[in-house]
Image: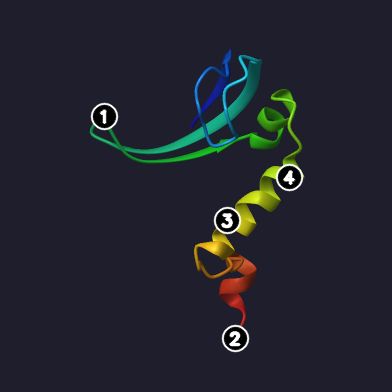
Amino acid sequence: SHHLTEVGHYTGYGSFGPPNGRRLAYRAIANCFVRENVILEEWLLSDDVLVIRQLGRDPNDIARARALADRRDGAAPAQPVGPLQRGLG
């Protein structure tokens, strides 16, 4: 497990829209499964809401746009999955 501090500028097209050059700084945590000094799996948790806010955008607008795009593409709505849902039934 390791903690990261990411710092940079939003200069390219990404999942949060077109570039605007704004400075970003946020933290993340990565948990890795390693065998014989080789990372076989990595789980990454980063604060996307903080990034979206630092870009001057509204997290609700981004979420709404993604949900509507999924519906247009015919994707089924995501079902919640976790310990509680797996235990039901």
Q: Determine the secondary structure under disc 3.
A: helix
Where residue 4 sits, quadrant-wise, is: top right
Mark 3 is surrounded, within 10 Å at the Cα level, by few (under 14), some (14 to 19) or many (20 or more) other residues, namely few
> Which amino acid lies under the numbered mark 3 shown in the image of this protein?
Ala
Q: Determine the secondary structure under disc 1.
A: loop
Whichever of labels 4 and 3 marks the residue nearer the N terminus, that label is 4
Mark 1 is surrounded, within 10 Å at the Cα level, by few (under 14), some (14 to 19) or many (20 or more) other residues, namely few
Disc 1 or disc 4, which is closer to the eye? Answer: 4
Residue at the spot 55% in from the left edge and 63% down from the top edge: 72
Q: How many marks?
A: 4
Q: Nearer the viewer, residue 41 or 6?
A: 6
Residue at the spot 53% in from the left edge and 17% down from the top edge: 11
- The image shows residue 82 at horizontal and vertical percentages of 59, 64
Check disc 3 and report the residue beneath it: 69
- State how far apart marks 1 and 4 are (Cα): 42 Å
Whichever of labels 2 and 1 marks the residue nearer the N terminus, that label is 1
Check disc 1 and report the residue beneath it: 37
- State how far apart marks 1 and 3 are (Cα): 40 Å
Q: Determine the secondary structure under disc 4.
A: helix
Outermost residue, left side: 36
- State how far apart marks 2 and 1 are (Cα): 40 Å
Whichever of labels 2 and 3 marks the residue nearer the N terminus, that label is 3
Mark 4 is surrounded, within 10 Å at the Cα level, by few (under 14), some (14 to 19) or many (20 or more) other residues, namely few
- State how far apart marks 2 and 4 are (Cα): 35 Å
- State how far apart marks 2 and 3 are (Cα): 32 Å
Check disc 4 and report the residue beneath it: 61
Q: Nearer the viewer, residue 31 or 18?
A: 18
> Which amino acid lies under the numbered mark 4 shown in the image of this protein?
Asp
Residue at the spot 58% in from the left edge and 29% down from the top edge: 28
> Which amino acid lies under the numbered mark 2 shown in the image of this protein?
Gly
